[in-house]
Amino acid sequence: MNILALNSSARAGRESKTEILLTALVEGMREAGADVEVINLKDKKINVCAGCFTCWTKTPGRCIHQDDMSRELFPKWVEADLCVYATPLFHHTVNATMKTFIERTLPVVEPYLAESGGRWTHPLRHQPPGAVVLSVAGFPALSAFEALSHYVRFLYGAREGALWAEIYRPGAEALVRAGVRRRDILEATRQAGRELVRDRSVAPETLDRIQQPIDDDLAAFMEMANCFWRSCISEGVTPREFDQKGLIPRPDSVNTFMLLLTYGFNPEGAGDARAVIQFDLSGSIEGACHFSIADGAIQALAEAADRPDLTIRTPSDLWLDIMTGRADGAEAFTQGRYTAEGDINLLINFARFFGPTD
Ligand SMILES: Cc1cc2nc3c(=O)[nH]c(=O)nc-3n(C[C@H](O)[C@H](O)[C@H](O)COP(=O)(O)O)c2cc1C
């Protein structure tokens, strides 16, 4: 099977959630024996459609523009058995780069009007490839893709069997820190790639795994996302710079502090450890809270614990500086800038419980 995979993201690498998902899908397709070419549309010169209808009249089937679309992409697209349209969700639909590509496929149809069952179309000049639409979005619920799904079903779904699958991943920005779920989502996306080559469709169970919630608690997701954006604004950094500097969202209350540590909890690092860690915070955030860690899970409560194994008394800003590497934890401890009472091994192993998962 000859597959053309188009990626219209403006970003790349770990930053691009479109690329992360597309890479997994393509891996699965190749494992199943398909011949897949991935093209990043941002590297190509694709002029916007001039609307001149030259491709319908003076040079039937051939666009007036001489660019990468005419020379390379359109011929490859027409030849492919399947095209994967991988796009970030921008303003509820495909982004402008993908839309420009789609509009430039006009030479595939003839100008004549046809009507069937109330739907108006143009006769095909060539058989276009089957379509898989893959998209990622910032909002955490699948409803983010409603407008896009309506559009692609209208665009590619009219011909029987032309739309092989729609693969949508909401809350995609959070994929990077989704730990175990991230791995399952990417493995399911690989599985979708294998299924597409084998069955020309994706099993509902596989789609469910790809679309599984990153968070069971959407209110907490929203709180963390808003905390992240407030931190970017107050630090004067873009998300990319935030990531490059290794920053973490700055909580502004005991509740967001608890959320942050709960989010940063690493179940694999914690293993079968059991511990109750209490914080007595002072400074910008005042108050007590504690975390109960057991069986690879964490529970936070905004109150002092009955019998904590470790109690950390610290100015909140100092602790956040230690967590982001701006302050040296061991040095601050010997200088008495914070105190720890109880099982000091828990303090030494703190990064094991709350470090990155991947
Ligand atoms: C201009 C713009 C418009 C966006 N519109 C939406 C939107 O309508 N719904 C949504 O859930 N996310 C929206 N997002 C978030 C992106 O879909 C999200 O950041 C995605 O991960 C981008 O893909 P990438 O990681 O490959 O760059 C938008 C982002 C930008 C920059």
Image (tube, rainbow, N blue to C red):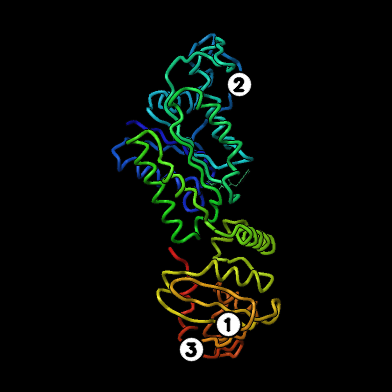
Q: Quadrant of the N terminus?
A: top left
Looking at the image, is 355 positioned above or below residue 229?
below
Identify which residue, 20 or 61, lies in the foreground: 20
- Tag 3: Cα neighbours inside 10 Å, few (<14), some, or many (≥20)? some
Residue where numbered disc 1 is placed:
278
- Amino acid of disc 1: Gln
Give the Cα separation between the discs numbered 1 and 2.
65 Å
Identify which residue, 183 or 119, lies in the foreground: 119
**Residue 191 has which mark?**
none
Residue where numbered disc 2 is placed:
50
Left/right of residue 339 with respect to residue 345 in the rendered view: right
Image coordinates for residue 85, horizontal then vertical, percent? 48, 35
Of badges 3 and 2, the one in the foreground is 3
Q: Is label 2 in a helix, a strand or a loop?
A: loop
Left/right of residue 96 with respect to residue 271 in the rendered view: right
- Tag 1: Cα neighbours inside 10 Å, few (<14), some, or many (≥20)? many
Identify which residue, 318 or 119, lies in the foreground: 119
Residue where numbered disc 3 is placed:
343
Looking at the image, is 15 positioned above or below residue 250?
above
Of badges 1 and 2, the one in the foreground is 1
Quadrant hosting residue 318:
bottom right
The structure residue drawn at horizontal position 64% and vertical position 76%, both measured from the top left corner, is 302
The structure residue drawn at horizontal position 51% and vertical position 72%, both measured from the top left corner, is 298
